[in-house]
Amino acid sequence: MISLQLASLAIPALLTVADARSVPASSTFTPIKWSNCTIPSPGFDCGTLEVPIDWDEPFGAKVQLGMLRQKALKPEKRIGSFFFNPGGPGDNATIYVEAATEVFGQDMADAFDIIGLDPRGVGLSSPIRCDPDIYNQRVPLWPSNQTELNAIINKNKALGESCYNMTGPLMKHLDSVSVAKDLEAIRQALGDEKLNYLGLSYGTLIGQTYAELFPQNIRSMTLDGNMDHSTDQISYLTVKTFTYEDTLYKFADWCSTSTSCPLNGTSADVLKVWDDLVAHANKTPIPAPSCKASGSCLEDVTGWEIQYNANSMLFIESGVFETWPKLGLALYEARYKRDASLLATSKATSPSSSAFEGTAISCLDWFHPQPNLVNLKNKYNLATSLFPHVGMGDVGENHCMGWPFPQVNPEHRANIHGTPRILQVNSQHDPSCSYVWANGLQEQISNSTLLTRKGNGHTSYFLFGESWEIINAYHVNLTVPADNTFVSS
Ligand SMILES: *[C@@H]1O[C@H](CO)[C@@H](O)[C@H](O)[C@H]1NC(C)=O
Ligand SMILES: *[C@@H]1O[C@H](CO)[C@@H](O)[C@H](O)[C@H]1NC(C)=O
Ligand SMILES: *[C@@H]1O[C@H](CO)[C@@H](O)[C@H](O)[C@H]1NC(C)=O
Ligand SMILES: *[C@@H]1O[C@H](CO)[C@@H](O)[C@H](O)[C@H]1NC(C)=O
Ligand SMILES: *[C@@H]1O[C@H](CO)[C@@H](O)[C@H](O)[C@H]1NC(C)=O
Ligand SMILES: *[C@@H]1O[C@H](CO)[C@@H](O)[C@H](O)[C@H]1NC(C)=O
Ligand SMILES: *[C@@H]1O[C@H](CO)[C@@H](O)[C@H](O)[C@H]1NC(C)=O
């Protein structure tokens, strides 16, 4: 979700608490194997646990999960283990634990063993492998005729088959239900503590799935930047493109008056630059010279690719990880220097690239659109008539047409009952996970509080503002903000 560039802290190894904990007699799991790891840096515990690839075949083939742990810095204040998932899908959690005290703050680091579990198929947990050459073939994002539709389907099918060849049956079991069961296995293998969990973005789907399956086993859970997995295809498309367009307007307002945006002028001017670039690049792709030099991205950029790739550049307005100034610069360079390098589509540069994980995971959790040209054009017409600037936006489901593995986690209402109070956090203008979804999900959880952040951007925790403090206070002290609370950071 966010790429972290924090210098990792040299954290002293704390070995005052015994590693071995009793595993409940009822558990079929062996204890987690911990070792002193030197990767990413000395001072952390690396843990592994084997679980079934297919939870419906508990005695079948196994997959190894890997996790990184920073133990509670003040063992006398220790509450339990705290799990973090950054979303993606496919982003690894371990990198955040490397900088745990900075990222989660002193109180959290004192009181919790902070565990970054890479979800199955990602990072330390048996990462999937696929053929980068197939991945790097360019096909249209949305087809205008049957030839283009066939090209999309064929590419997806070939890519999926290459992953199966190089990875095996794990490809069919990367969905959020499998990951939620993995979390439960780890919780049991650690002892009898209840789960403390913070999930961002796609991590909210993992969290809500866990809450649906194991409501009694939670102590605290925050869902930041919420997904609603109950919506049908048209609602999904509409909400996803709406929230992107809505945030693009906010960006244009900001850019028009900001000294950190080289496109300043009026918001109408900013949107016109955007529209002209998209239209122009769809006729003649705009060169990306830095990609040509580095080989790490496609050498030019189409209009649809601008619409798809710019979404993540709307994630953070300002602060340590800000992306809005970068989007302003990217659009400026594309428009005035004919250099669209900053908007280019990344390539996969090796079979172990993390580029494959998003598609591999989401196509198991979300519908595969019908490979039907009339139907796809109807959707295209819907999106472009309501949201003309972003069009089909970052809707990635076309990557699932022809994907050789069926959806295993169908959309459904999450009936979440019997949990302690769950904390949901969402900004009003989130380019990826709409405030609509946060409200929709809240109706599916019988005991939750929705904290609203006034403002823009995707997720709130890493702004290190009021939301961060409220979330940390909730996990440490179980204090929940009053209903209908608004914060501005
Ligand atoms: C980790 O290293 C410490 C100090 O070198 C040692 O005491 C401890 O037994 C090691 N733990 C494991 C699990 O290897
Ligand atoms: C986790 O992600 C970061 C940043 O994307 C990357 O540098 C690191 O190598 C990844 N770690 C693993 C274990 O894959
Ligand atoms: C399909 O559309 C593409 C892009 O507009 C065009 O280049 C191609 O000739 C079309 N193919 C057919 C068979 O119509
Ligand atoms: C996968 O392996 C099969 C059998 O070896 C082979 O026929 C097929 O071409 C491979 N597919 C891809 C996409 O690598
Ligand atoms: C507009 O952007 C330019 C270049 O970044 C900057 O020099 C100028 O001060 C900005 N103007 C306003 C009104 O922000
Ligand atoms: C919600 O959870 C809190 C504990 O976090 C509990 O005190 C309260 O009774 C629960 N409310 C409902 C309606 O279940
Ligand atoms: C938890 O409560 C204690 C006592 O009121 C307070 O000092 C501490 O700052 C709280 N922790 C967090 C993370 O807010």
Image: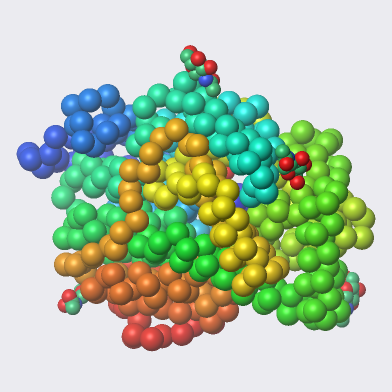
Q: Which quadrant of the rendered structure holds the C terminus?
A: bottom right
Residue 489, relative to residue 65: is it above or below? below
Rendered location of residue 259, percent (x, y)? 82, 75
Rendered location of residue 100, percent (x, y)? 47, 53
Q: Which quadrant of the rendered structure holds the N terminus?
A: bottom right
The residue that appears at 26% across and 40% down in the rendered structure is: 19
- Location of residue 82 by image quarter: bottom left
Most foreground residue, 127 or 173: 173
Q: Is residue 418 left or right of residue 54?
A: left
Judged from this view, the residue extending furthest toward the left is 25
The residue that appears at 23% across and 64% down in the rendered structure is: 415
- Location of residue 140 by image quarter: top right
Judged from this view, the residue extending furthest toward the front is 374
- Quarter of image, ligand 5: bottom right
Most foreground residue, 162 or 80: 162
Q: Is residue 51 visible?
A: no
Rendered location of residue 439, percent (x, y)? 39, 75
The residue that appears at 43% across and 65% down in the rendered structure is: 226
Rendered location of residue 18, percent (x, y)? 24, 41
Q: Is residue 138 left or right of residue 267?
A: left
Most foreground residue, 384 or 65: 384
Q: Is residue 392 visible?
A: yes
Residue 170, relative to residue 140: is it above or below? above
**Colour pattern:** rainbow
The residue that appears at 56% across and 60% down in the rendered structure is: 379
Q: Is residue 149 left or right of residue 256?
A: left
Residue 6, relative to residue 271: is it above or below? above
Judged from this view, the residue extending furthest toward the right is 337
Image mark count: 0
